[in-house]
Image: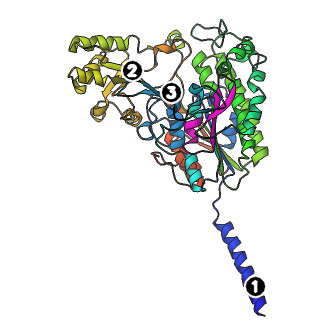
Amino acid sequence: MQRKIALFFSLVLAFVTVGAQSVGSVPRPKLVVGIVVDQMRWDYLYRYHDQYGTDGFRRLLSDGYSLNNVHIDYVPTVTALGHTAIYTGSVPSIHGIAGNSWRDRETGESVYCTADNGVQPVGSTSTKNGSHSPNNLWSTTIGDQLRLATNFRSRVVGVSLKDRASILPAGKNPTAAFWFDDTTGNFITSSYYLKQLPAWVNSFNAQKNGETLLSKGWNTLYPIAQYTQSTADDVPWEGTVGTAKKAVFPYKNLPTDYVKDKGVIRATPFGNTLTLRFAEAALDGYQLGKNTDTDFLAINLASTDYVGHTFGPNSVEVQDTYLRLDRDLAAFFKMLDAKVGKGEYLVFLSADHGAAHSEGFLRENKLGGGFFDENMKADLEKALKARFGVEKLVMAISNYQVYLNKKTIRENRLTESEVKAEIIDALRGHPNVLYVTDMDKVNEASIPQPLRNRIVNGYNWKRSGQIQIITRDNMLPTYSKTGTTHSVWNSYDSHIPLVFMGWGVKPGASDKPYHMTDIAPSVAAMLKIEKPSGTVGNPIAEVSHP
């Protein structure tokens, strides 16, 4: 009898225990996929909408929740900052990434955001391409927080053609981060993450996907007459790709160019195809979405940025790149449905920044524009020498910021405040400058909100320049005389798409104002984990609590 009673209570205890685990378990998706489309203006969701299929961008819009009024809440709006802000929920002032590159304030040397001489390339002999890590990143990412929440059982992987766009999203302690090596045409990593490439990476690299993708060159997906959202195929403000003599389809030079320069694939839509193929290989290689805890795959599609920089946003090349990307995304989502399960994964799609119209396009269409920095540094040096009798008081003008040469200032017994005052006075007389401010006195400057907040958020007192320049609308730096670029606060650079789809997301849309820094805390709220360490954003209620 006692044995029966003991057996009864042991069964009850087992039942209660199983029930407690089931009831108390935190509901989470099997996989989170972050897709950041480099240089994707918000309006691209609708500019080419009629030519998109039903299973790519239009699936995101129909099945997902679209936030249509999301802006970047800092300047400058560049790649490294965008990816870092999306995944940390923070701003340069806090997370430490002050630009793609910045100047060391004491030495004047350029510092690349992910360069790290303390690590070795893995999969390449090029230290320039392979010696990278998140060493300059001060804040954790959403991937780091997911790993912490699951006692590091969750697998977090970053994938991009760009080192910085793989490394910074993946965070400080991911499973791995991989990027493209122009010298070999392979995806590589560094010793920060791994001692050697996994077998599945070697297998993928051995397939020579880049060579296959470019084997037929690049022609338009549809007859060129259907590209009615673009300018003519041959306009003077477009650059060229590879050895092409003109920016005109078809680009038959690409197969030959790729033999000599693997990096040529970056400025074609096939760089995105290559990246998504590698992302699928990573999914299989690490069995993402099939583990006991939620996994995270951070993907950057970088070719949209290279194509945009080369040809400008109104080009046939950009339109064709997005039409092809739409097909690639459709295939990728279909793959996730099959391998992870429809409704079992959460995906968000956003961008690190937008892009300005090409200077030539603006001029031809009477929309203003020009080049703000022609002779700017030389003119400043001339004004400073006339005032102080000293040369080389300006170290550099970078990221729309003026870096002072502190050593020269000290050696000539000048003060930073008097040099800054002279620079600001000179720049206020520049016809293309809208505002200029001493960053030590920005709160006293007559600059409207929210622009002032964006300036403060983007200023890192150890890594940014001492003076911030805000140009008039549509002013580009001189290096972008063909194609285009980005970096400013205006809507064409700061207005980004943001769509959530899949697990826990109900279809819908909102025009409420949100920020790039709200993405990471929204994902954290959905996963029921702590926000990244430097987060300044807030969860978006429409998706975090639908």
- Structural distance between the alpha carbons of marks 3 and 1: 67 Å
- Structural distance between the alpha carbons of marks 2 and 1: 78 Å
- Structural distance between the alpha carbons of marks 2 and 3: 20 Å
**Residue at the spot of label 3:** 493
Direction from residue 390 to residue 109 in the image, left or right: right
Q: Is residue 367 above or below residue 7?
A: above
Q: Which of marks 2 and 3 is nearer the N terminus?
A: 2
Which image quadrant for residue 423?
top left
- Give percent across and percent down for residue 56: 71, 34
In the rendered structure, find residue 8 and report the number of the disc placed on it: 1
Residue 178 magenta-drawn? yes
- Give percent across and percent down for residue 88: 51, 43
Q: Which of 420 and 138 is in front in this view?
A: 138
Q: How many marks?
A: 3
Q: Earlier in the sequence, mark 2 or mark 1?
A: 1
**CA neighbours of label 3 inside 10 A, class few (<14), some (14 to 19), many (20+):** many
Direction from residue 482 to residue 24 in the image, left or right: right
Determine the secondary structure under disc 1.
helix
> Which residue sits at x=60%, y=37%?
191
Q: What stretch is highlighted in magenta?
A: 166-190
Which image quadrant for residue 432?
top left
Q: Earlier in the sequence, mark 3 or mark 1?
A: 1
**Residue at the spot of label 2:** 397
Q: Are marks 3 and 1 in contact (CB under 8 Å)?
A: no
Q: Are marks 2 and 3 in contact (CB under 8 Å)?
A: no
